[in-house]
Amino acid sequence: MIQSLLRKQESDTDLALAQFRTFSKQIPLLYFVLLANMMALSWTHWYVAPVGLTLIIPGILFCISIVRLLVWWRPSSVRVSSDQALRRLRFTLFLVVVLGASFVTWALSLYPYGDAYHKSHVAFFIATTVISCIFCLTHMRAAALTLTAITMIPFTVFFATTGNQVFVAMAIDLILVVVAMVITLITHARDFADLIHTQNELTDRQAQTQELSDENLRLANMDSLAGIPNRRSFFAELQKRLDHAKRDGTALAVAIADLDGFKPINDAFGHLTGDKVLQVSSSRLSRAMGPNMFVARLGGDEFGIIIEGERDKEALQSIAEDICQMLSQPIVFPDISVEVAGSMGVATFPEAGQHAQTLFERADYVLYHAKQHRRGRAVLFSTEHARDLTTLSQIKHELHSSRWEEEITVHFQPMIDSDNQRILGFEALARWDSSRLGPIRPDVFIDVAERSGIIHRLTEVLFSKALAAATTWPDDIRLSFNLSARDVASRPVMERLCGILARSDFDAHRLEVEITETSMMRDFSAAQTNLRMLTSLGAQIALDDFGTGYSSLSYLHRLSPDMVKVDRSFILDIETNPISRDIVKSLLDLAHNVGCECVVEGVESVSQVLILRNLGCRLMQGFYFSKPMPEDELQSFVAAHASNDAAGGRTSAANDRPEPTEATIVNLPSAREA
């Protein structure tokens, strides 16, 4: 049984450690009781027993006990391992056998000396020593049971053979007491073991729970696709490092990088390829991060970067440019090779702001500026940008006021059929002359309206005003109206626009809705469904800025517009650049082949008109014919063209038109003449 208990103790290291910790607190008490009893027994037998039994042997046992008492009493700052605990417990069991046998033998050796009182003290010594040792060895069943056997068997046999009824009765009583104590010992030891196991299970569960919590926290702060920290982690890290920068006066910069051209890759090759592009870009960014840098994916194809310790603006610009160049490297897959460009906006602390949100917003602002003006490059936030932001903030504030609806007006720029100098239609263009801020460029306030969520209301107001003006035009003149990406993506907005159109006196068949590829890129199916609400009423679709996007042919095929408008960027150098002429010619032929009209925008000179005519272009729009004009000037412009038609300026058919000359083009009526 003892061997079984020892094997169980050695196999259960957690229980052995718990026994050792508890036993180490009780063992000094055991030796103290043992020493006290031994000294008392030696003192009572001092005059009746030999010196060897009252001094020499007790002295040896006393020294051994004192040493062991000091060993256990001495505090240890070193944490005991399970192997060390097992070794010390095994040695303790060995000492229990040796010392137990020694003390019993020594006590029984004193029995022949002295009177009945001395003999009774020997029995009392053994009984109290056994009981106290069992109590102190409660958490070491093997040692307690071993000591019980070593002491009780000789004690019982010895006193049972004395023939003295008192001693026999004492032996029997002690056996009964010890048996009860052993039963209690076994029960207590079992409960102690169960308690330790339960505690260990709870500890393991707590560890598992903590590990799961740590893993959930890691996952909550990691982007599962890119394998780098996510938006939540970025802002937490930004706040921590910003606090450090404020406390220690160190430099800090916040950068936002965006992958230009990622959406067309998604559309052309699918989301799986898009995901791989994000993974490769994330891996490149991670490898490019220095020891004082942090990168996270903010969402979509946007990444946030924190740069610590760099105050020099030129060095910071160089770091950002290097990252942009790295992101622009071709990404080669087994079957295809794709390229994206990396644009970046950078805001520095404390110049660009004192708060994390401010730094992020300003980095985002200059990222937008980079994508608009320096695509594939990095832009640092400057005082000029700060002034622009102040102006934009004022514009945003004005757009939230109630005055802008009265101050917003619609100007109109004509689209001209150069075959017969006929006005094909007018494009409605927004103008705002603020009573507080003065004239504001349309690209500025429309962008602010889009970014601040006011674009829907702005579109509805402009649409109502444009329709009201167009109802006074001749029936053969069309109205062209621009819709933003947010308008096209919103079904409620399209429903309200259809309602405005239905309530107006304007014939829906004379309406052309101009959209850009950008407005279709977010969700083509939803945009196409929303546009059908207008086309079902009779409106036509025009694809604006044709040729400048990443997938013009794709949208031309899928959308089947009634008209395409070639962007003015192809016209700027058409007089000197043969490539521009070839591109425009290709776009004109493409539009003709798919059966839709083609309007070339940005025409500003006679020579451009002549070149476009020779290339086969019939429909044009630009400052040469007229700048955008307010409604009150439009009537005179229309009247001037009508009088020109009456004078014979209009030909009966395109095939009958004479060859264009500079003289015939110059005589076209324009806003300047009107």
Image (cartoon, rainbow, N blue to C red):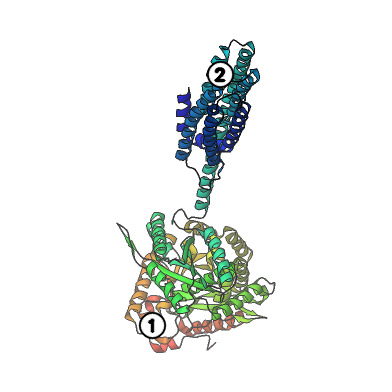
Task: Please state the horizontal and vertical placement of residue 488, each as a whole percent of the image.
Answer: 53, 62
Query: Does residue 578 show up?
Result: yes
Q: Quadrant of the C terminus?
A: bottom right
Q: Place residue 271 in its image quadrant.
A: bottom left
> Closer to the camera, 642 or 445?
445
**Please, is residue 473 above or below residue 188 in the view?**
below
Name the residue beneath numbered marker 1: 573
Direction from residue 376 to residue 240 in the image, left or right: right
Q: Tell which of 287 and 662 is nearer to you.
A: 287
The disc at residue 291 is none
Cα–Cα gap, marks 1 and 2 = 120 Å
Q: Residue at x 47, y 34 (%)?
A: 91
Label 1 packing within 10 angstroms: few (<14), some (14-19), many (20+)? some
Q: Residues within 10 Å of mark 2 (few under 14, many from 20)?
A: many
Q: Nearer the viewer, residue 313 or 362?
A: 313
Q: Position of residue 60 (x, y in %)?
A: 51, 33
Amino acid type, residue under disc 2 in the picture: Phe
- Along the polypeptide, which appears first: circle 1 or circle 2? 2
Amino acid type, mark 1: Asp
Q: Position of residue 583 (x, y in %)?
A: 35, 74
Q: Can you identify the residue that label 2 sits on? A: 155
Helix, strand or loop under label 1: loop
Regarding residue 516, the answer to whether it shows in the image is no
Residue toward you, 410 or 55: 55
Asked which secondary structure carries label 2, the reply is: helix
Above or below residue 465? Residue 628 is below
Q: Quadrant of residue 191?
A: top right
